[in-house]
Image (cartoon, grey):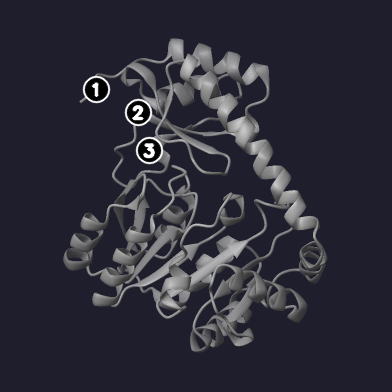
């Protein structure tokens, strides 16, 4: 990929205490392509992959395409349930674990330093490779621990992109990993997509990063999102919808619906009025998030959306809590 952008990304990784050389970083067409390339490189049909439960729904779709067995690790406010993680390493013998390093999608949870250390200790004992998706990292007010920094890019593969912070139209991701793995991943990229991201996209991102405009943009965006999260949380609570936690940053709220309501039923009712909601089981491997829903606070400024949500909550059937 473009040398100028790669150098800038290496400097940004260093800010997270992730030491990488130029031969340890490659550019991709998107964050999703980065994950797909690593899966192509590491997985064979039938391999077991651990994901967080709940997790970003596209991880599950991508892994199904690779014919992997997907197993969920329960998420806690301080990161994955480490005791369960360790049990699954012993019983399932997974090849790979995919997780968000910060501001977990959909819950907004951030792993603690103790959780990160215990995850890496268990991964080392069981020879597990980890994909650390850092796509939401720049939304954090203060940087949380990164697995790639603690591991030194030995068994952790760091990926990221700028589609969430700049524009979904500027498609460019990256992979930071062991140099010998990067060589193979480049070959796979050429074989499957004839190369990396658009030169126009890489030039735009490099120009934004090289000055101080990106930092100013992110400072302003974090402040706006903080105000919006608080405002949306208050409005949701007035409807009996409780956030599972208040994230340190980002634009997602993972919430429990009132009175044991089924989130899928609420979403179906809202869809009749052309409002798309995100019910919990879309994100859950174990299908145990039926009372939960993910809200994107950046998309909740329309008064009509709130009117539709109220009607959907009133019309959708409830469920008895277990």
Q: Is residue 267 left or right of residue 5?
A: left
Which image quadrant: the C terminus? top left
Quarter assignment of residue 63 = bottom left
Q: Which residue is mark 1?
A: 321
Numbered disc 3: secondary structure: helix
Q: Residue at x 22, y 63 (%)?
A: 86
Residue 58: x and y in percent read 49, 52
Residue 7: x and y in percent read 71, 78
Q: Mark 3: give few (<14), some (14-19) or many (20+) Cα within 10 Å.
A: many
Foreground residue among 301 and 60: 301
Q: Residue at x 41, y 43 (%)?
A: 283
Quarter assignment of residue 213 = bottom right
Q: Which residue is mark 3?
A: 281
Foreground residue among 222 and 302: 222
Quarter assignment of residue 304 = top right
Q: Mark 2: give few (<14), some (14-19) or many (20+) Cα within 10 Å.
A: many
N-terminal label among 2 and 3: 3
Residue 222: x and y in percent read 65, 44
Structural distance between the alpha carbons of marks 2 and 3: 9 Å
N-terminal label among 2 and 1: 2
Residue 291 image label:
2
Residue 10 image label:
none
Q: Is residue 10 left or right of residue 41?
A: right
Residue 120 vertical placement versus 222 (above, below): below
Cβ–Cβ below 8 Å for labels 2 and 1? yes
Structural distance between the alpha carbons of marks 2 and 1: 9 Å
Q: Is residue 256 visible?
A: yes
N-terminal label among 1 and 3: 3
Q: Is residue 102 left or right of residue 232?
A: left
Q: Mark 1: give few (<14), some (14-19) or many (20+) Cα within 10 Å.
A: few
Residue 239 vertical placement versus 87 (above, below): above
């Amino acid at each position: 990929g473009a040398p100028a952008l790669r150098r800038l990304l290496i400097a940004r990784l260093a800010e997270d205490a992730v030491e990488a050389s130029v031969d340890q970083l490659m550019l991709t067409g998107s964050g999703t392509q980065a994950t797909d390339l690593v899966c192509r490189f590491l997985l064979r049909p039938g391999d077991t992959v651990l994901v967080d439960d709940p997790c970003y729904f596209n991880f599950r779709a991508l892994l199904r395409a690779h014919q992997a067995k997907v197993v969920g690790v329960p998420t806690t406010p301080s990161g994955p349930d480490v005791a369960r993680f360790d049990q699954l390493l012993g019983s399932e013998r997974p090849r790979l674990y995919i997780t968000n390093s910060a501001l977990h999608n959909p819950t907004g949870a951030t792993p603690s330093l103790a959780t990160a250390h215990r995850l890496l200790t268990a991964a080392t004992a069981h020879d597990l490779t980890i994909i650390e998706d850092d796509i939401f990292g720049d939304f954090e007010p203060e940087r949380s621990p990164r697995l790639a920094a603690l591991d030194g890019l030995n068994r952790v593969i760091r990926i990221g992109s700028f589609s969430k912070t700049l524009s979904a139209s500027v498609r460019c991701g990256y992979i930071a990993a062991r140099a010998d793995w990067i060589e193979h991943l480049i070959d796979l990229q050429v074989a499957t997509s004839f190369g990396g991201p658009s030169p126009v996209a890489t030039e735009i991102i490099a120009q934004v990063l090289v000055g101080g405009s990106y930092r100013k943009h992110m400072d302003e965006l974090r402040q706006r999102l903080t105000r919006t999260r608080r405002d949306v949380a208050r409005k949701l609570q007035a409807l009996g919808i409780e956030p599972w936690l208040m994230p340190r940053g980002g634009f997602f709220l993972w919430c429990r619906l009132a009175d044991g309501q089924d989130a899928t039923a609420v979403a179906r009712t809202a869809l009749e009025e052309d409002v798309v909601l995100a019910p919990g089981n879309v994100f859950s491997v174990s299908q145990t998030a039926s009372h939960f829903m993910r809200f994107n606070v950046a998309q909740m400024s329309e008064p009509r959306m709130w009117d539709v949500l109220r009607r959907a909550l009133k019309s959708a059937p409830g469920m008895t809590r277990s």
